[in-house]
Image (cartoon, rainbow, N blue to C red):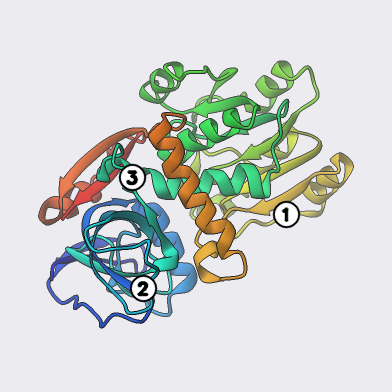
Amino acid sequence: MKSIRGNFSGDSLSVSVSDEQTIPELGPHDVLIKVKACAVDLNKEKVYHQLLSSSIKDCPIGRELSGEIIKVGPLVDDCYKEGMSVVGIVPLDCNLSGCSEMCVMNQFDITEKPSTVSHEVAAAAIGAGLSAYTAIHYLGHVTAGDTVLVLDGATPQGYFTIQAAQLWGAKVLSTYKTLAERQFLELLKPPVAQLIELTQRSNTMSSSVTEETGGMGVDCVVDNGVRLFTSEEDIDLMEERHLRSVPHKVDIIACLGFSGKWITSHPHLQLDPPDSEQLFLRGASVSFLFPPAWTLTRAQHGRYHHILKDIMERLAAGQLKCSHLTTVPLIKATETLLQKDLDSTKCIVVIP
């Protein structure tokens, strides 16, 4: 059975189509799914595998999938039947690739896909939606009237984060890096309160936020990566040279208001004493956004399943919309995934 595997060892990154994946026997609560679409973000895949895998060679690629059930285990709930369309996220502790012809998943990691939502949109939305819900509701505790700064709002995850914040009644500010991203964000309805350019040439984020909020700062910042160092030597040593258009941690802290919340996706964030002092004086806090934690522990699984279901319901109702999609067949996916000039506003969806 064909599947996509990746090699994340060292600085190299390679992706290949393998015929070696086999279908394991179904457990009592497992379902066998014929995959129709699977969303892929290689940058996230690399970070997650380097954090959790003992080996970063021959890693499964693709976790957010949509498809049809073709077989169910003996103890699977009656609500899941053969032929039903479902969507879900493959846990990181599973060695199966979502970018394959078929995949085995636990019934507690999937939810029914509405008939009005296509498989491609469902696969593209489920992972980004989970990140947005986790950041805005469970970590940021955003409420109506709050002000939220979303970095890189034109990316698939940023787009859903903006929509989730607006659904909760928040005022949203967002950053962009390219003209294409700005044009994408300008078309949003309801519109973003302010768009802030964030490039190598200029960094006016903190001053723009101060002006927009009347010097009060924002209630929540959701980043998409952060720079930690300022000296040229440290930047070269820690390989941050490629992060020139990513904001520095000091700029993000400067944007926070009283009791502000910084939601970061940087797994190795380092705060120096002056940084901690600034957070202390603001009564602010830092939370780490790691959506796969929902599937690595069953303590909050009821809430996790509720998020998946709510995302699908809001997609069907038109309250949430998916960003632009780029669909590619599985056998040609490696060429597309390794392109360096991919449009950051589009989500890559592999079709087996």
Element class at badge 3:
helix
Q: CA distance from mark 3 to mark 2?
A: 28 Å
Location of residue 186 in the rendering, given as x and y in whole percent from the top left corner: 45, 16
Q: Is residue 230 at least partly visible in the picture? A: no
Residue 207 is left or right of residue 186, and the answer is right
Tell me if 75 is positioned left or right of 220 in this view: left
Give the amino acid at mark 1: Leu
Give coordinates of residue 105: x percent, y percent. 34, 69
Q: What amino acid is found at the position of numbered circle 3 in the picture?
A: Ala
Mark 2 or 1 closer to N-term? 2
**Residue on which the image places disc 1:** 271
Tell me what residue is drawn at x 60 percent, y 40 percent: 222
28, above or below 169, in the image: below
Q: Is residue 252 above or below residue 211?
A: below
Q: Which mark is residue 284?
A: none
The residue tagged 3 is 122
Residue at image position (47%, 72%) is 52
Is 195 or 27 nearer to us in this picture?
27
Quick check: 191 above or below 49? above
**Front position among marks 2 and 1:** 2
